[in-house]
Amino acid sequence: MNVCTMHGRIANELELRQVNDKCLTNFTLAVDREKKGSGCDWIPCVAWGKTAEVICKYMHKGSEIAVTGRWHSDSYKDKNGNKQYTHKLSISSMDFCGSRADNQEQAETMPNLDDMMANDVDDAIPFN
């Protein structure tokens, strides 16, 4: 059974897009690791339809959110003919977490996603 539930903060600005008459949004979820001070994991996520619309309407960078979905892996050949893998959490449901004030304050103080990822000490890919 492929069911994943994650709790974290949205790490980038949200954008609602239209693809083949369907709404979607892609974002990265920053999920703290179990041991305090050991950093966080960056989970690429995609939401479709009404779920995407609700996320983009009520959430923003720094918002605390709990999501449930399925882990999706795919592969493609890059321009050099090498096989590359992508992984993404395809969201089927979500819950708002934290208060409105907490989410707004977090969004104002959250650093840039690229800076945060560059400072993450664990650069190893956990799976191939």
Image (cartoon, rainbow, N blue to C red):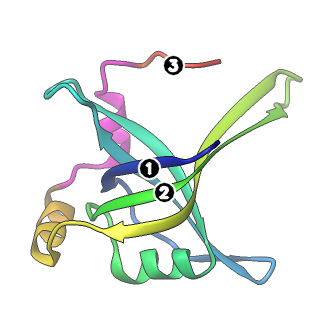
81 lies above or below 19: above
- Amino acid at dot 1: Thr
Quadrant where the N terminus is found in the figure: top right
Q: Nearer the viewer, mark 3 or mark 1?
A: 1
Mark in the foreground, 3 or 2? 2
Please name the residue that numbered disc 1 is placed on.
Answer: 5
Q: Residue at x 14, y 57 (%)?
A: 109
**Residue 86 image offset from top left, x and y in percent:** 67, 37
Q: Which residues are magenta?
A: 110-122
Circles 1, 2 touching at the beta carbon (< 8 Å): yes
Among the 4 quarters of the image, the one containing residue 76:
top right
Magenta-colored stretch includes residue 91? no
Gap in Å between the C-alphas at discs 3 and 1?
Answer: 18 Å
Q: Are marks 3 and 2 in contact (CB under 8 Å)?
A: no
> Looking at the image, which residue sits at the far right?
81
The amino acid type of the residue labelled 2 equals: Thr
Look at the numbered disc 2 and give the secondary structure of its residue: strand
Residue 126 numbered tag: 3
Sooner in the amino-acid sequence: mark 3 or mark 1: 1
Distance of label 3 from label 2 (alpha carbons) = 21 Å
Kind of element beneath mark 3: loop
Does the magenta portion include 116?
yes
- In the rendered view, tell whether residue 16 sits above or below residue 74: below
**Numbered label tally:** 3
Image position of 14 (left or right of 102):
right
Image coordinates for residue 96, horizontal then vertical, percent: 30, 71
- Residue at x-position 35% and y-position 81%: 58
Q: Position of residue 82 (x, y in %)?
A: 83, 21
**What's under tag 3, amino acid-wise?**
Pro
Location of the C terminus (image quadrant): top right
Q: Earlier in the sequence, mark 3 or mark 2?
A: 2
Q: Using the image, tell me which numbered label, if any, was put on residue 68.
A: 2
